[in-house]
Image (cartoon, rainbow, N blue to C red):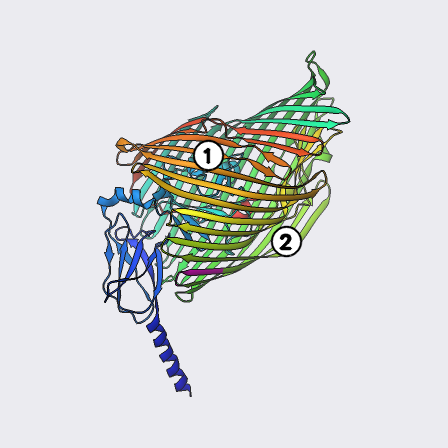
Amino acid sequence: MKNLITSIAIIFTILLNAQSISISGKVVSQKENEPLMNVAIAFYDATTQKIITYSYSDFDGNYQANFKNTKFYIQADVLGFYSYKSEIINPLKNLKWDIKMQQNTEQLDEVIVTAKKKFIQLKGDKMIIDVASSGIGDGNNGIETLSKLPGIRLTKDESIAFRGDGNLQILIDGKPAMLSGEALQNYLQTMDGSNIKSVEIIANPSAKYSASGTGGIINIRLKKNKVTGLTGNVASTVGYGEFIKQYNSVKLFKNTKKWNFNAGVFYGYFEGVNHRKIVQTVTQNNQNLVLDQTNDWLPKSNMVTSNLGASYKISKNASIGTSFRFSNDKSDEITNGFTKEITNGNYLNYTLLTKNVANNKRTLTGNMYYSFATDSLTTKVDAQLNYASYQRKQNEFTTNQYLNTSDNLPYQNSVNIQNNNPKAFNIFSAKIDVEHKISDKLSFETGSRFSLVNNDYNLMLKTKNAQGNYVLDTSKSNHLVYNENIFAVYGIVNYSIEKWNFQAGLRSEYIDYNAISKTNNTSNSGNDLSFFPSFSVNKSLDNNQYKFSYSKRIQRPNYLDLNPFYEYIDTYNIQVGNPNLKPQFTDAYDFTWVHKRKTAISLYAKVAKDAIDNVIDYDQTTQITKLYKANVAKTKNIGLSLSTSVKATKWWDIYLTGDFSFVHNQSDIPNFSYDETGTNWSVSVNQTLKLKHHWKFTWNSFYNSGGSYGNMVYKPSYDTSLGLKKSFFNKKLQLNIKANTILKQSKWHSITKQDNVKTEWINRWETRKFSLSLRYNFGNGKKKKVKATDLSNEENRL
């Protein structure tokens, strides 16, 4: 009986293999062994010489196909390389077949022209934009290049938002950028867009990634050179809008067969301005009060950042490495404010504000990692230990003078406030990820992560008494110590069959936190266990790709927002913390269709409860507006996103993006309730013109229709930017001239109405900025980066 069963199994296996086979492999360049993307791979019947099926290589050069078992041969084609044709293959089982292609230098110019037609690819939960072949990075810095991608735009403070949501993660080569806020903006502004190979947009991240963040993940893949030796570059940029700014950097890479080293130093000097105008109108008891406020914030900053990394190849399958980054940012900020107080049309009083702030921020991050992959790449292991220390000292002096318009004399005593605000953060995390390929069709991923956060935040607000001494105001000061532990574990299953790919995952995160106010002798602690499912299904045909994905996300409060602090902005505006903030949970859905790898249309939806947003609470008695964050609303957002490329002429390329969304928001917060719906749309046009003598001209424009969110309506904004770029000395020296937002219409303009209070807010950063950049590349070494510290989840909440 046992022999009979064995025989049947053998016969069944033979018959199954006779019916169909699976072939997979990797496409690389013959000389540099560099993975090649978007290679067209055709499989021909060796007898009839008719095509059986076809495939395309992905970002990592991998391809896969399934068809009936027969004698066949492979032909691979991509512009810039000679056509590849294999020998006749007579498979008896599933096989792995790698393809090496020889470069054809005579076709290089043709590659640039044609490849732009196929620069969008879907893979798993990612939409991959081939920035290098599309040319949208030419003449632009990193943040400008990102703003031209589908669904991405800049917010009122020039940070990146995806489909209107700024709560996203930015990765560089799959690892956190290790910067946030202004530091991240400065880093992306100094990045050359022409050095970006591709960008992965992950609208609904799988269970492998941290569940934090509702805006998805943006992963920037940089170009790499595969030659050993010493290489590097020196770069300098000088710019001027209303004030001067300058950035300088030196990067070095040294690589041998076993060792890889990289080091860099960046220095930046920045002077800028933010023009803010707030007009608040209060109607009460037949009385009309208008507070007309104009503030100019003028920061000056010196920033030095250095990094050092090394990795060692233990064997052909395993490597270890470490990296460190240190930054020191010193800034002096001056705010000058002028507020008119108009009652029933009579302008009787005004207030003068002067604020001086001295900041010193120091950051040290480091990591150690171990990576292993088997020869067949069926098993991969990645382990990391990460540490970060953040120290910030802040000393602030604010003076308000209250004067009569009739004689410019005080009508009440001046208010003088000193605010000392030292902060200290320490973060430690450990993680391990394992990926195992069970068969050509089935693979499994799993991993775990542990993070420990210690946050010491001390706010000391002092007021000046009659004797001229600054005395601590205990009612508005607070020393908060916050500790948090998060443990996460996940599992993902991937299954592929013919043109279909399925991915399902589940992530579990347990958080235990404790916040102690040493000033008030109070504490707030708790723990929570949450589960985050994710799912995606892809289908890839010749001219069409389809993807549907779902994931559950969480937005945890920023550490400082949990502190019941009191920040004195000016006479009429204060900001406070909210220890009762809860996490925001979001269910996100996305359906994407890509046609001919150049046009992408996405239909998406997000449903959130306990949504975190800024609340504006006006006190009619004190005439003070209090700003704080709260779990305001239930939100529903349904949108449609479109992107495509058009080749107008041989020398003129146009890239178009558009986004339309419908939003419904509902809030039950006292004095901040609403139930509103609204729509908004935006469009951008990015053009590249190739001129004579290898000059390139770029012209980028955008228009945002404005829209509404709850009881706030924001107005349209638009602008245009120009650029000119040229390379010299065999592309070793690059010149880039830019004129950004030259129409001065890139600004935030909103109107909020709540009960009898109307607040109009205009916020405009420095516009019409001109810059001149030079970068010189030397050497011909291999620019291989060492893994960066992975603390993205914790850093995003600082």
Answer above or below: position of 68 versus 360.
below
Classify the position of the C terminus by image quarter. top right
- How many other residues sit within 10 Å of disc 2, few (<14), some (14-19) or many (≥20)? some
Callout 1: 10 Å neighbours few (<14), some, many (20+)? many
Secondary structure state at the residue bearing disc 2 = strand
Location of residue 408 with respect to 208 vertically, above or below: above
Q: Where in the figure is residue 281, as x and y percent of width and height?
A: 68, 27
Estimate the x, y position of residue 648 in percent, counting from the top left.
33, 38
Magenta portion: prevailing SS class: strand
Residue 558 visible within the image? no
Asked whether residue 723 is in view, the answer is yes
The residue where tag 1 is placed is: 702
Residue 663 position within the rendered picture, expressed as x and y whole percent measured from the top left: 58, 43
Of the image marks 1 and 2, the number of the one nearer the N terminus: 2
Magenta span covers which residues?
498-503
Instruction: Name the element at disc 1.
Output: strand
What type is the residue that disc 2 sits on?
Answer: Asp
**Residue 364: which numbered mark, if any?**
none
| Apparent side of residue 549 relative to residue 110 in the rendered image (left or right) | right
Residue 472 located within the stretch drawn in magenta: no
User: How far apart in space, not on screen, are marks 1 and 2 (Cα)?
Assistant: 44 Å
Residue 379: horizontal and vertical position, in percent? 41, 62
Q: Which residue is mark 2?
A: 512
Q: Quadrant of residue 690?
A: top left
Q: Residue at x 64, y 55 (%)?
A: 528
